[in-house]
Amino acid sequence: MTKTIAEINERIKKGEAVVVTAEEIIDLVDKKGVHQVAKEVDVVTTATFGPMCSSGIYFNFGHSKPRIKAQKAWLNNVPAYAGLAAVDLYLGATELAENDPANTVYPGAFRYGGGHIIEELVSGKDIRMKVVSYGTDCYPKKELSTWLNIHDLNEAVLFNPRNCYQNYNVAVNLSNKVIYTYLGTLLPRLGNANYCSAGQLSPLLNDPLYLTIGIGTRIFLCGGIGYVAWQGTQHNPNVARGENQVPKRAGGTLAVIGDLKQMEPAWLRGVSMTGYGVTLAVGIGVPIPMLNEEICRFVAVRDEEILAPVVDYSKAYPEREPDVLAEVSYSQLKSGKIKINGKEVPTGGLSSYAKARQIANILKEWIIKGDFLLTEPVQRLPSVETNITIKPLKERGER
Amino acid sequence: MKKRLVLTFLKETVEKPITYHLVKDYDLMVNILSAKIEPNEEGRLVVEISGKKENLSQGMDYLRDLGVSVQPLASDVRWNEERCTHCTACIPICSSQALVVDRKTMIVSFNPDFCILCGLCLRACPYQAIEIMF
């Protein structure tokens, strides 16, 4: 028994679609079996909420009188990239304020940067913008200082080159001192273990071979409607996989895009990682159409069946050594403790499962109400049949 | 009677042996939960003090006479629920289990009575959801 996305959309429009979350589907399949559930359910909603560094916004702030061609620009003293057209800027989530002491007083607090400005813009707060230029015949103005509000911008678009990592490292610290990483504060001698994935709710863990999520897939993006724009940077389909096809290492990724003006601060938050930097937490929900039994088996994946590698962030990670200390499941991670080298280690998350659950339920409501139709991917993401792998940098002195 | 208190000293009082006097003169049990005392700087002690009610009240009068500010512990820690995303990064860091997560809902909550003001969560929280005010 197979269904098409067009058929599912007809059922959504009629208000007849059966929609469940990637958490709810697990018990359903347990009770009724794959064959029955594949017939009964039309859409499964997946979600994730966590820090995603490769994120940012671009916007057009409108032409001043006289006109200026932005050469350099700052938003609340945080540099924005002006190497685009005259009044277009891109602000990256991890950009620091000009006067941030960073790690000169270690560990730096990194209280404010690009991610926080994005959150403030979405909250409707005014942001101070400064622009300088060299001046041209057609753009004579050389300096500009004004307040900006998201409502006054022509376009404001969230465009994230890499989000939604399909699985990720669990970070630990084998050294004798506290270390501060993008996976949080790690206490010495295996004092804690931090992970960052929604596990059984996470979009790409429910579609491990990218059968339904592709370029053009309509998604929940930070409270608004967004789209999958491309595979994300470092997209790596050819990692080790389990029998269930779920990657056991960081695998695929998504580049996503959406209208910033539709978004809500609850799902898009500035993040300060002590000793590391600033970033942005992004909330994403992705619907998976129940096209057949194979997809039903994939979306029924549970935390016990998803394994993540435990990596030492005091040495193996920074030195790019491949060592993995252990593999642990997300059910172990979410229980609050895991065992590594015979030692019981308490776990902490960076990805909020509570928020992911909320997003999966909101997307479910949107679809049930008929407000959100599914899209046919324009093109599939590169999967295991390609030879794509992630290449390390080879530093070289000669051309 | 038992109280958890934050004692803030002026730099002039830092070198006085006040814990000794609380124990000896007022028969109080003083458990130091955290301390930041440097010569010639404002100091701070987080203590749990127990003893008879009247002894406690006299002990507190003694501290105030010395110019030590005495505040209940709970009022100094603020967990901003609006900022918290329930990511659980603070959970393994909080050894006193003031910050805990319900494993079923994965929702984080804060119990100020268990907090010993160690301050480790301030660095561990990526959302600046916890503030300690002195």
Image (cartoon, rainbow, N blue to C red):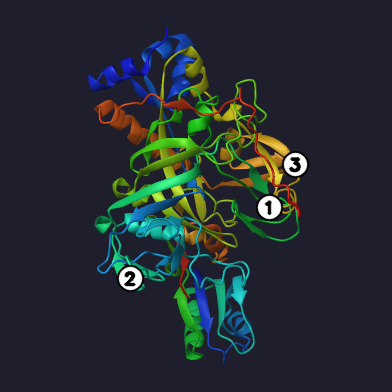
Q: The N terminus of chain A lies in which quarter of the figure?
A: top left
Vertical position of residue A335 compared to residue A270: above or below: above
Circle nearer the N terminus (3, 1): 1
Q: Residue furthest top?
A: A1
Query: Dot 2 corresponds to which residue?
Result: A140
Q: Helix, strand, or loop for circle 2? A: loop
The residue to which callout 3 is attached is A322
Residue A390 location, x and y as percent?
Answer: 65, 38
Q: Secondary structure at mark 3?
A: loop
Seen as rendered, the residue at the extreme left is: A14
The answer as to whether the residues below labels 3 and 2 share one chain is yes
Task: State which tag comes first along the sequence, 1 or 2.
Answer: 2
User: Mark 1: which amino acid?
Assistant: Gly
First in sequence: mark 3 vs mark 2: 2
Comparing A75 with A177, the one in front is A75
Residue A10 in the image, given as x and y percentages of width and height: 27, 17
Q: Position of residue A315 (x, y in %)?
A: 75, 52
Q: Nearer the viewer, mark 3 or mark 1?
A: 3
Position of residue A352 measured from the top left corner of the image (x, y, whole percent) = 48, 44
Q: Is residue B49 above or below residue A224?
A: below
